[in-house]
Amino acid sequence: MKKILKKYKIIFIILIDIFGINLIISLLNLINLLNNSVSSILIMLNTIFLYLYLGIYFGKKTIKKGFLTGIKVGLIGIGLMFIISILFFQIKINISMILYYLILLTSSIIGAMIGINKKENT
């Protein structure tokens, strides 16, 4: 049971962060404290730093080949975001969406590589 909870921990972290922080940013946008471009940038940066953090977190737990861990973490998160965007919001796939997902995957890979290097140095 503990192994199952550890596997799904990443999904819960992603959901809580993305919905929580993005909800706050959207509410600030709704009451006109932020404009649309600033809120879009903040939401994108939040998601990029989340994937970087998750890559570092799981990179510290892996034994070797941090980039593979980063790919796994990134693909799980991106798959979850993709399913939610297609099913609930009916967003169509375009080049900017693909580029955004590639940026997220890259940040996850970089984070895992940083994480595995931090583990070896400490």
Image (cartoon, helix red, strand yellow):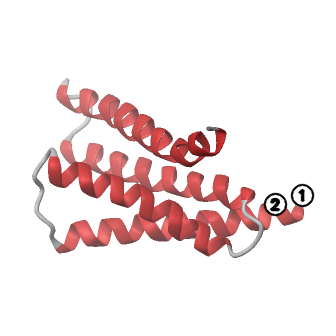
Residue 22 % position (x, y)? 33, 37
Give the residue at mark 1: 122
Q: Residue at x 22, y 33 (%)?
A: 29
Quadrant of the rendered structure where residue 110 is?
Answer: bottom right
Residue 32 % position (x, y)? 19, 28
Secondary structure at numbered mark 1: loop
Residue 33 % position (x, y)? 26, 29
Secondary structure at numbered mark 2: helix
Estimate how packed mark 2 is, as few (under 14), some (14 to 19) or many (20 or more) residues with alpha carbons within 10 Å. Answer: some
Give the residue at mark 2: 119
Quick one: 40 or 117, which is closer to the camera?
117
Q: Which mark is residue 48?
A: none
Q: Residue at x 24, y 48 (%)?
A: 84
For the C terminus, give its image quadrant.
bottom right
Furthest residue in direction front, as rendered:
1
Quick one: 27 or 64, which is closer to the camera?
64
Estimate how packed mark 1 is, as few (under 14), some (14 to 19) or many (20 or more) residues with alpha carbons within 10 Å. Answer: few
Residue 20 % position (x, y)? 38, 31
Quadrant of the rendered structure where residue 101 is?
Answer: bottom left
Furthest residue in direction right, as rendered:
122
For the N terminus, give its image quadrant.
top right
Is the residue under label 1 in contact with that under label 2 (CB below 8 Å)?
yes
Q: Residue at x 44, y 38 (%)?
A: 17
Quadrant of the rendered structure where residue 76 is?
Answer: bottom left
